[in-house]
C-alpha cells in the first residue's frame, strides 16, 4: 500500500503563502520530517501572486500550490510509506498560519494488479 495525503488550508497568512523562500523552507522541513530526500524540485512564483512548489522525493512527491488572493493553499503528499503521518497536516497548518485545515487520506493499492 501507498498513501496520499490531500490537505486544504484556509485563512493562510499571505506573507507566508506568497513568499517563495518561506514555501521552499516549509516544504524542505516537511520532506525531512517524512524521512524522504529531494530527488528534484521545481518552483514558480506567479505574478502578481501565487506559488507552485513541486518536489519529486525519494518516497514519491510533495507539492504546494498557493492562492494568496483567497488565503488558500493546497498540499499533496504521495508516499510509498504506508504510515504517512497525518500530523504533517497540523504542522502545515501551523507553518502557513492557516485558520482551517481539511485532510483527506487515500490508500493506494500499488500491488492490486498482482
Image (cartoon, rainbow, N blue to C red):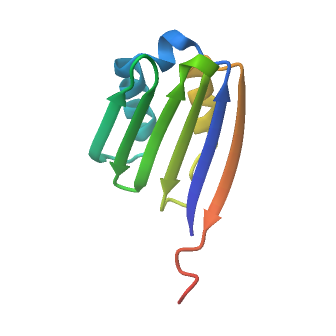
Residue under the point 56% across and 51% down: 84
Number of labels in the image equals: 0
Q: Residue 86, percent across and down?
A: 64, 43
Q: Is residue 38 left or right of residue 50?
A: left
In the displayed orientation, state which residue is furthest to the front. Answer: 48
In this rendering, does residue 34 appear at all?
no
- Residue 5 lies, with reference to residue 114, above or below; the image says above
Quadrant location, the N terminus: bottom right
Q: Residue 68, percent across and down?
A: 55, 19
Residue under the point 58% across and 18% down: 69
In this rendering, does residue 43 appear at all?
yes
Residue under the point 59% across and 46% down: 85
Q: Is residue 34 left or right of residue 38?
A: right
In the displayed orientation, state which residue is furthest to the top. Answer: 15
In the displayed orientation, state which residue is furthest to the left. Answer: 40
Q: Is residue 13 left or right of residue 64?
A: right
Residue under the point 59% across and 73% down: 109
- Residue 93 lies, with reference to residue 43, above or below; the image says above
Q: Residue 99, percent across and down?
A: 71, 19
Amino acid at each position: 500500500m501507498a498513501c496520499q495525503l490531500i490537505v486544504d488550508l484556509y485563512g493562510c497568512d499571505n506573507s507566508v503563502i506568497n513568499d517563495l523562500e518561506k514555501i521552499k523552507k516549509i516544504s524542505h522541513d516537511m520532506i525531512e520530517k517524512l524521512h524522504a530526500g529531494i530527488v528534484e524540485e521545481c518552483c514558480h512564483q506567479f505574478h502578481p501572486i501565487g506559488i507552485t512548489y513541486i518536489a519529486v522525493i525519494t518516497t514519491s512527491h510533495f507539492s504546494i500550490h498557493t492562492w494568496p488572493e483567497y488565503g488558500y493553499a493546497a498540499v499533496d503528499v504521495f508516499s510509498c510509506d504506508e504510515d504517512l503521518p497525518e500530523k504533517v497536516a497540523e504542522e502545515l497548518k501551523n507553518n502557513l498560519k492557516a485558520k482551517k485545515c481539511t485532510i483527506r487520506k487515500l490508500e493506494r493499492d500499488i500491488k492490486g494488479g498482482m
